[in-house]
Amino acid sequence: MLHDQRFYVAIAFVIFFILFGRKLWTAIVTQLDAHAQSARQELAEAAELRRQAEQILEDATREREQALAEAQAMIEHSRQEAALIGETARRDAEAIATRREQMARDRIAASERAAVQDVRKQAIEAATAAVREVVAHHLAENGEAASTLVDRSLDALPGALRAANEAGPGAINAA
């Protein structure tokens, strides 16, 4: 065993390890600790980035929900406005139709009144013409009756004028 090279290599290795092992061990442990610390920092950064990403996602989700709620509110408001405008337009159209109908009725009533007045006027003119003819024919046949009729008419004229003035200008047209 003392003559075997493996024995000397093993002893040299043990002595090397005893002499330089502590320094190597410290360097290796320091290196591994630094690497572990670096890994921990990277994990902490990754966790922080993940937390920030989750926060941003929550904020974006909240904003999206708020935007959807606002959009729904706007749509509902627009629907209500449209219904209100439609109702107002319907009422306005009904009011216009009612006014036009009333105007048409008023025109019809005015036309009826004008027609009735025309018929009355023509009836009066026809009656007046007939009376003239009858009176002229009767007076032509009987002279004494004509003279009596003229005298009575002249006597009744002031009373008729007074009655017409008291009744007003419309009384003559109504008669």
Image (tube, rainbow, N blue to C red):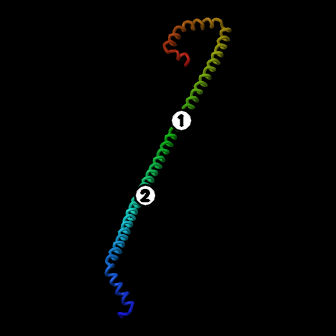
Residue at screen point 34% across, 72% down: 30
* Pointer 1 local density, CA inside 10 Å: few below 14, some 14–19, many at least 20: few
Residue at screen point 63% across, 17% down: 125
Residue 19 position in % (x across, y down): 31, 80
Residue at image mark 2: 61
Q: Secondary structure at mark 1?
A: helix
Q: Secondary structure at mark 2?
A: helix
Callout 2–callout 1 Cβ contact below 8 Å: no
Give 151 or 47, whichever is nearer the viewer: 47
Q: Is residue 155 above or below residue 62?
A: above
Q: CA distance from mark 2 to mark 1?
A: 51 Å
Q: Quadrant of the N terminus?
A: bottom left
Label annotation for residue 146: none
Under mark 2, the amino acid is: Thr
Residue 137 position in % (x across, y down): 68, 11
Residue 139 position in % (x across, y down): 65, 9
Give 70 or 129, whichever is nearer the viewer: 70
In terms of image quadrants, where is residue 115?
top right
Under mark 1, the amino acid is: Ile
Q: Is residue 107 above or below residue 168?
A: below
Q: Is residue 36 left or right of residue 99?
A: left
Residue at image mark 1: 96
